[in-house]
Amino acid sequence: MKILIAEDDVYIREGLTELLELEGYQCLVACDGEEALQVYVEKKPDFVLLDIMMPKLNGYEVCKRIRHQDSSIPVIFVSAKSEEIDRVLGLELGADDYIMKPFGNREVIARIRAVTRRCMTTQDTGKVDGFDMEDIRVSPNQLRATRGDQVFELSLRDVNILRCLYQQKGNVVSRDELFNQCWGRDYMANSRTLDQHISKLRKLIEKDPKLPRIIRTVHGVGYRF
Amino acid sequence: MKILIAEDDVYIREGLTELLELEGYQCLVACDGEEALQVYVEKKPDFVLLDIMMPKLNGYEVCKRIRHQDSSIPVIFVSAKSEEIDRVLGLELGADDYIMKPFGNREVIARIRAVTRRCMTTQDTGKVDGFDMEDIRVSPNQLRATRGDQVFELSLRDVNILRCLYQQKGNVVSRDELFNQCWGRDYMANSRTLDQHISKLRKLIEKDPKLPRIIRTVHGVGYRF
DNA sequence: CTTCGTTTTTACAGATTTTTTACATTTATT
DNA sequence: AATAAATGTAAAAAATCTGTAAAAACGAAG
């Protein structure tokens, strides 16, 4: 298991590296945000430890960009300042956990194990995360849908739309509601944005996009699963 | 969906608010136990996130009192101390889940979703949407009516007309009133619009459209269920 | 700064629903 | 029964809504 340690303080960085290598992890290191991103792209670690205050690019930003490539990779933030930590919650970063400096060895190990376990179980069972719609399975964390061994890559918005419809299966979900849930703002009367996404989704996941079985149109109101 | 966030720490409270609003929830906040109860009574949220240690009234107590009013509302406890969490399990509060601080965004979202889903299904089985008219059942949320296993697709307007008649069952509803309720404007003397809709509805849901049993005409005034 | 990929807007063609028209039928009144 | 007023309904017309290609705007990555 490869862990990326992004931390500018050399002592902490080396301390973490030594600790984690003793635990059997393979460590990749980065001294600033840009390097972290670069290493991430090149080496594709399985886990990321991110300091928040780093030169060039802060941890929030790094997390955002990493998440953009893989929405399910576990990320733990590391910081000395509790305000920084609290901000993590406020930003839409999807952090899995965080560790306050100064931290003890056991704490680091424990948290990494806990997060790993959480992520593992959701992947292993494949049941905790994801839901079925007709004959396809949607896995929000992987941004994917599958029918048998066919795999469809979905965007975050696609997943949200599907989830929205799924959560109210049987009921009609109005355009307004879909827009609110998936875009977080009001639906503008003559916008074809939603239709465009539905169209794209149908082309992707419906066997016959002309006769949709999963996403049905309810004229004058919205859509229904 | 309205979520009540009861949490005294301003950072965590605002972080949660921002996170959940991005997810499409409407957030209500409270800084202490008493406020939480007050907001609960006034706004009737659909979901409660409760910190355990709060000024004035602790989370256990708040939960107990909320449960007294609504024994089915989902409640998730939030706490940093595992002993506190353990007590939740010991007290018979009927908590649906709990979250340990520090927590990651995805954990919060995942738990809320899981609990919501659990409660949804219990609602699905328990709570049925709609009303009965004679031998058919009307489900406004699905825009459907059913007689046995026959399903009739209805438009929003159809449902409104039926609801209008249902709400005053036994009484005659004048054309004027129906038009006002369902179209939001005045009925124009020589418009056949309303009749047309009634006609369509009767063809759809009446066993014998010529001898209507659900929607009856009251000559010179309007219709009655 | 440029390029590539994605999202949003524009524009328009169909599709679907609602309203009107026109006339048949029913009901109340004389 | 004759008449006038109100209702029922098929079919045409009008209004509204949806689907989608293509252009424009946006954002991330190099």
Image (spheres, coloured by chain):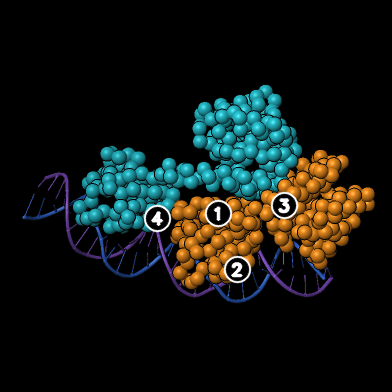
Chain colours: A orange, B cyan, C purple, D blue
Q: Residue sitting at 58 percent across and 70 percent down?
A: A150
Residue beneath label 3, please? A116
Above or below, comparing residue C2 to residue C17 in the picture: below
First in residue order: circle 3 vs circle 1? 3
Q: Are marks 2 and 3 in contact (CB under 8 Å)?
A: no
Using the numbered discs, state the Cα–Cα distance from disc 4 to disc 3 in whole angstroms: 49 Å
Q: Quadrant of residue B78 in the image?
A: top right
Using the numbered discs, state the Cα–Cα distance from disc 2 to disc 4 in whole angstroms: 36 Å
Using the numbered discs, state the Cα–Cα distance from disc 4 to disc 1 in whole angstroms: 21 Å
Mark 1 chain? A
- Compared across the picture, whether A54 is left or right of A155 comes to right
Residue beneath label 1, please? A164
Q: Amino acid at mark 3?
A: Thr
Q: Are marks 3 and 1 in contact (CB under 8 Å)?
A: no
Residue beneath label 4, please? B155
Q: Residues within 10 Å of mark 2 (few under 14, many from 20)?
A: some
Mark 2 and mark 3 on one chain: yes
Q: Amino acid at mark 4?
A: Ser
